Image (cartoon, coloured by chain):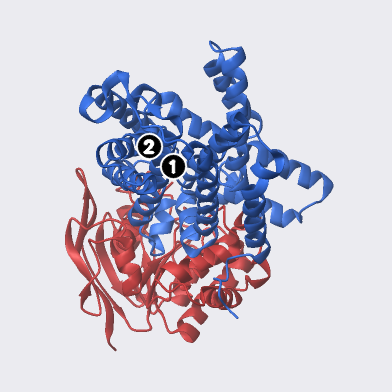
Chain colours: A blue, B red
Amino acid sequence: MKLLPHWVSRPALAALVAALAIGAVLPKVLGWSVYSQNQVTETLLFVAAALAWNWMGGYLGQVSFGHSAMFGLGGFISARLLLALHLPFWIAWIVGGLVAAGYALVWGHPTLRLRGPYFSIATIGVGEATRLVMTYWEDLTGGSSGLSLPITPGLKSELYWWALALMGAVIAGSYALRKSTLGLGLLAIKSDVDAAADVGISPTLMQDIVLLLSGFTVGVCGAFYASYQNFIEPGDMFGFDRSISFVLMAVIGGVGTIIGPAFGAVVFVMLRQYLIGSYPQLYLGIYGVLLIVVILFEPLGMMGLFFRIARRFGLLRPEVEATLEAKAAVGGAAADPGAREGGAP
Amino acid sequence: MTVILRAEGVSKRFGGLKAVDSVDLELNDGEILGVIGPNGAGKTTLFSMIAGSIPPTSGRVLLEGKVISGGSPRRAVRAGVVRTHQIVRPFQNLTVLENVMVGAIYGKARPLGARERALEVLDFCSLRDRAPQLPGGLTLAGRKRLELARALATEPRVLLLDEVIAGVNPVEALQMTDLIRSVREKRRLSIILIEHVMPAVMRLSDRVIVLDAGKKIAEGKPQQVVKDPRVIAAYLGESAAAAAPAPVSGTLPTPVSGSGPASHPTPPSNPTPTSTSPSKKGPGERP
């Protein structure tokens, strides 16, 4: 029986299904308070967003500091649709995601010709320009006073299961992107875009596909967030901290992996709750320090620590471990300067 | 013999520099064509134009009558022309097998059976036992074979090999020479070969063309070409060409063969100050 593509590992699939099933009954079993359940909902939402960011930042190696543009656009488009047309919220989310994906393509198609830091700098410009335009575009965003959504009783608690489903879909999507033949092409582009083109890959096409998927998913997350918060304003949705938060979640957890950004998002949301409560003036500074520490000492974040432990205790075969680490590495190049020398006499 | 690949008046200008100047080239089916010339002669730039990675300023390249130049590398690869790189460029984050699979999948957009096809190519290039490793663990010769394997996996008709022998030790050089020959015999490919290692060029090539300062200055059987005074002048300068007797061994002096006439002991890649064109490093050549 061959129902699944060859790259789907049955244990991984079973684990995902089991985790989602447990997640689905957890609130009832544990009898969570409304507050705790909302916290978990928000965490699941950001797991999805961090993974979608990671498709660009981790798989393709193009670090975007402008993903708030799609997050905010998805949020405001769906909010407007909910206010004006009273659509079912999930249709509004999908439309918000589609608009965000279209916007991602508009700015991303030209800027993805840039690589590495140049692309990242361009995305900062895109993010900030979008924030400014949206702040003054009062017909869409309500300006700095923002938009309030109609509160539907019951929806907020129901959102937990929607977040779980969204996260499940994004994890499955991450797995498919990473393991499929498309994923192999993305890793090749991350390692050497010209060499990839020379064996028949079209980097432009592949990057556009990832951009659309990532933009759509982050747009849906923004729309979800709007429904969850009931109130959104451009400074928060399109803010630079918002973009940075996606980068941080992936980097803390470990870019280029699936488990990494997911754990990173959990840590990030918990940390933010604590820091905003205790040190509201300092929390952005603490993020900055955290980012520097992680990049300096463990560029693969929590996954890097995991690899270290696995190496130490022989949990993974060394070549498996080295292969996994190389695939996750930013820029795709394992530290092997010797590999690029030679040739010219 | 039928011509499989034809370049018609191909030129490339980088600002004020004519890196390649109206070069005509014909590759017959099943032939190995050597391309030689001093550093900066425009060999790699010519390759890049044939492989579609840079568009020619003028002229065109045809594979069996179909234009392949001026588009993308993908167009050339899909048509059946693929290149390797002078400085090896494996995907460092993929295993040896996955590197070759990328070629097998994207070369002709055929994801099915890519793994089996990649393994077959690895077998052919004696890299099968390295399949699960990262390319960083290979020797330079191994990485050059991987570069060749990745290109072969795209199932080309024409293979462009950019210095796959230079830089490896003499034993590995012989192995690579045998491998290239079996690519032609067993896989029925036509090959264009850029190479500085003269003994290998002499042994492998059916025909040789010589580039100097972007222009084709000679063409013919390897043994004839190296005796051509214009070729000797291009490598060693006019005075050397006038002073030197015809090379006795039938090869140009190289660091590997070490059989050059004593009157001009400098390696061809490193022109002496007496040369008429001492610095010929063009943008097409990587350092």
Q: Which residue corresponds to the image point at 40% horizontal and 34% vertical from the top-left? A: A226
Decide which of B231, A94 is in the foreground and name it.
A94
Decide which of A301, B265 is in the foreground and name it.
A301
Can the viewer see residue A218 in this picture? yes
Residue A125: x and y in percent read 32, 28
Q: Which residue is mark 1?
A: A62
Residue A19: x and y in percent read 66, 52
The crowding category of the residue bearing disc 1, from other C-alpha atoms within 10 Å (few below 14, some 14 to 19, many at least 20), is many
SS at mark 1 in the image: loop
Task: Indicate left or right for B251 with B179 as reference.
Answer: left
Residue at the far right: name it: A313
Task: Indicate left or right for A194 with B5 as reference.
Answer: right
Query: Are discs 1 and 2 less than 8 Å apart at CB?
Result: yes
Residue A317: x and y in percent read 76, 56
Identify the image quadrant of the N terminus of chain A: bottom right
Residue A342: x and y in percent read 54, 52
Can the viewer see residue A325 in this picture? no
The crowding category of the residue bearing disc 2, from other C-alpha atoms within 10 Å (few below 14, some 14 to 19, many at least 20), is some
Amino acid at pointer 1: Gln
Q: Which residue corresponds to the image point at 39% horizontal and 25% vertical from the top-left? A: A239
Q: Is residue B162 above or below residue A314?
A: below
Q: Which residue is mark 2?
A: A119
> Which chain is disc 1 placed on?
A
Q: Which residue corresponds to the image point at 63% horizontal and 58% vertical from the top-left? A: A17
Q: Quadrant of residue B69?
A: bottom left
> Which chain is disc 2 placed on?
A
Decide which of A114, A240 is in the foreground and name it.
A240
SS at mark 2 in the image: helix
